[in-house]
Amino acid sequence: MMNISILVPEDAVMQAIADPQYLFSTVNSILMSAGNKPMFHVQLVGLKKEVKINSGLFSINTSHLLKDITDTDLIIIPALYGDMKAAIAANEKALLWIKEQYNKGAEVASLCVGAFLLASTGLLDGKKCSTHWAFQNEFRDMFPNVEVVEGSIITEENRIYSSGGANSYWNLLLHLVEKYTNREIAILASKYFAIDIDRQSQSAFAIFQGQKNHNDETIRNAQKFIEDNIEEKITIETLAAIFSMGRRSFERRFKLATNNSVLEYISRVKMELAKRNFETSRKNINEVMYGVGYTDTKAFRSMFKKVTGLTPVNYRNKYNRVSLPS
């Protein structure tokens, strides 16, 4: 039987502990109903017998203390709640245990912003990682040696797994079920929990927030200029001239401040405005396209799908309640 240790850290999200416990227990029931033996021994583990979560609103009783777990097959790190640095500090004593178990051969999976705790172990250095789209910039700042895969729901590398934001972790859990059992069982589990098993991206849910949490006032002014003139065709040369810089210097400072190249940033701002138009207006695709400064339909559709994972028509149908012409 496979031992699954669901870590119960301080300041965790309760659902991210309960959901994997529920899923793997349900898979055991599915296996037994088909005449097979249960496959997973699921245990809640922590530094204390009673752990406060959600800023003390709830508490969870663990079944085992970390010091008593000398061998496990899979560690699940749930999403954290509140301030990430404070949550990591509260769980610092768990980091060594995670590393020790990994070095003994255990696999490790982080759910949503549980990636912050996983990255704090150093196990993600030089590797790829997924996390909630809204926390990607903070994650990059805290862990510059980890490659954040933007938009991805699942990453897997060297026995380490991570998932995208919020309910995206269900897709990682189903991925693990399929790996440890088979496709048929994973499909049955996905149907039981009404989860789309093959969703590959969280891009359609992401909101581009502008990455203005930096100290370069000139670049912030450039960002505002881009946003105020989004219907125009803005070039790097134009921006560099407006802000009295050479092109290379401007590009370097912009990338350093925002984590985007100038052209990436312009495209993301344009696509964010296009998304809002598709969500809330009756404009057709061409009207939205022209409104964000595109004149090439193919280029607009290609960039929109690259950013959101959906075509403009599919995105509009997903988020706009009114049926509109193409």
Image (spheres, grey):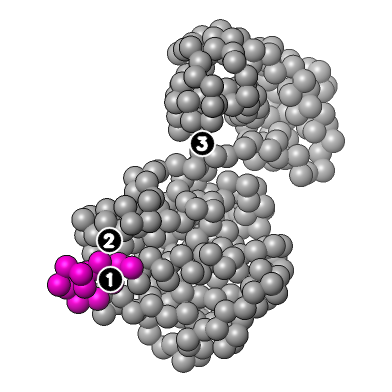
Q: Nearer the viewer, residue 123 or 23?
A: 23
76 shown above or below 207: below
Query: Marks 3 and 1, Cα distance to the nearest angstrom?
Result: 34 Å
Q: Is residue 254 magenta?
A: no
| Depth order, front residue of 213/63 | 63
Tell me where residue 21 appears, x and y as whole percent. Answer: 42, 71
Tell me whether the residue at label 3 lies in contact with that at label 2, contact meaning CB atoms closer than 8 angstroms.
no
Residue extending farthest to the left is 35
Crowding around mark 1 (Cα neighbors within 10 Å: few <14, some 14 to 19, many 20+) is some
Sequence-first tag of 3 and 1: 1
How far separated are the C-alphas under marks 3 and 2?
A: 26 Å
SS at mark 1 in the image: helix
In terms of secondary structure, where does tag 2 sit?
A: helix
Displayed quadrant of residue 160: bottom left
Residue corresponding to mark 3: 204
Residue at coordinates 63% horizontally, 47% vertically from top-left? Answer: 134
Magenta part of the chain: 26-38
What residue did someone put label 1 on? 29
* Foreground pick, 183 / 228: 183
Whether residue 306 is visible to the viewer of this picture, yes or no, is no
Mark found first going from the N terminus, 1 or 2: 1
Going 41% across and 88% down the picture, which residue do you hit?
70
Which picture quadrant has residue 282?
Answer: top right
Image quadrant where one finds the N terminus: bottom left
Dot 2 amino acid type: Lys
* Residue at x 58%, y 75% (from the top left corner): 9
Identify the mark at residue 166; answer none if there is no mark. Answer: none
Q: Is residue 268 visible?
A: yes
Q: Amino acid at mark 3?
A: Ala
Task: Assess disc 2: are there few (<14), some (14-19) or many (≥20) residues with their C-alpha within 10 Å of its C-alpha.
Answer: few
Percent x, y of residue 228: 77, 20
Q: Name the residue tied to disc 2.
A: 179
